Image (spheres, rainbow, N blue to C red):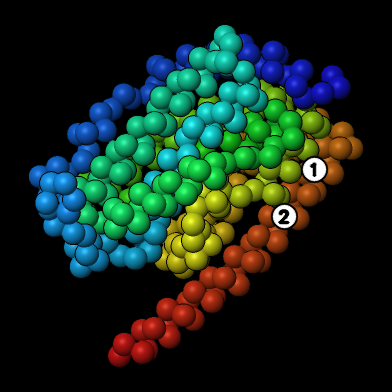
Amino acid sequence: MTADVDLLPELEPSVEQLLGRHLATCQDWLPHTYIPWSTATDYDGPLGGEPWTASQSGIAPAVRDALVINLLTEDNLPSYHFEIATRFGRQRAWGEWVHRWTAEEDRHAHALRGYLHATRAVDPVALERQRMRTMSAGFHSDQPTPLHALAYVMVQERATREAHRNAGAACNDHPGRLLMTRIAADENLHMLFYRDLYADALDMAPDLAAAALADAICNFQMPGTTIPGFQQRALRIAAAGIYNLTIHHDHVLQPLLRTLRVMTRSDLGKAGEQARQRIARHMEQMQATAARFNALYQRRGAGRAATCM
């Protein structure tokens, strides 16, 4: 086998089987039932409501950052659909999965925006302007091969699951926790589809798949990096313990590597072994960097506490 594009037809029976499992497992849900409409009031504008002010939001700033990043990331769904549709095709089982995944993902932005608007958690004018800028920029994964694209979406779905789940846990209200838990459950099922499909790819072409996975892990960036102010928000989110390098290492990459048996496989050739060594070095470096950042966050937290005493 000379090119990983040859794997797409070979993987199609797995796609069909995993799609059937997904449809039997997933739970359809209604976004409007998760939004606390009883708390909503009209905004200023044609309806003559009340303007938004920061005092109306009871959500901590870092949690607000996380919810906005999560929403604006979900808003870019048209770009993500284009990416996977052009990579994997829109025919037969691959096409069925692409469209089903898109339909399920489309719920997330609708529900999350409705929640933020109904609870007046964020400035709706700034949010809409950021949506326009984010979607106008689009998203390009720049993955060189279909296997790279598959490896990326596997890691990304796991990371997104953690980001949604942890943002919900940090919310100080019940509807927010319920909604983010529901969205995270969708992301988990999407991750399971891609993870188990990648396991089959590893069995079919161990060296090619291991090399693509090493590239995806070592060069990974969240899809929200094009969002205005992403870096500053990401730092606040990390400091608050909602999503940071420790979480990425411990709860995203380590479980995937363990389930895929990447570090213990005995069927890797020279290229696969080099890829495994790259992953091991990257994981060690990430741990060291995470420890330094965590120490910095603790010092800053202790400094703020001392200032307030």
Residue at 69% in and 49% down? 219
- Residue 100 sits in quarter: top left
Residue 230 place in picture, x, y as percent: 50, 58
Residue 143 at x, y percent in the picture? 70, 37
Residue 250, how many percent across, how many down?
A: 55, 53
Residue 255 drawn at (x, y percent):
57, 43
Per the rendering, the mark at residue 282 is: 2
The residue at which mark 1 appears reads as 275
Q: Residue at x 50, y 66 (%)?
A: 232
Say whether disc 2 or disc 1 marks the residue closer to the N-terminus.
1
Is residue 150 toward the left or the right of residue 64 in the image? Answer: right
Q: Quadrant of the N terminus?
A: top right
Asked whether, in this view, residue 226 is left or right of residue 304, the answer is right
The amino acid pointed to by label 1 is Ala
Residue 288: which numbered mark, if any? none
- The disc labelled 2 sits on which kind of residue? His
Q: Secondary structure at mark 2?
A: helix
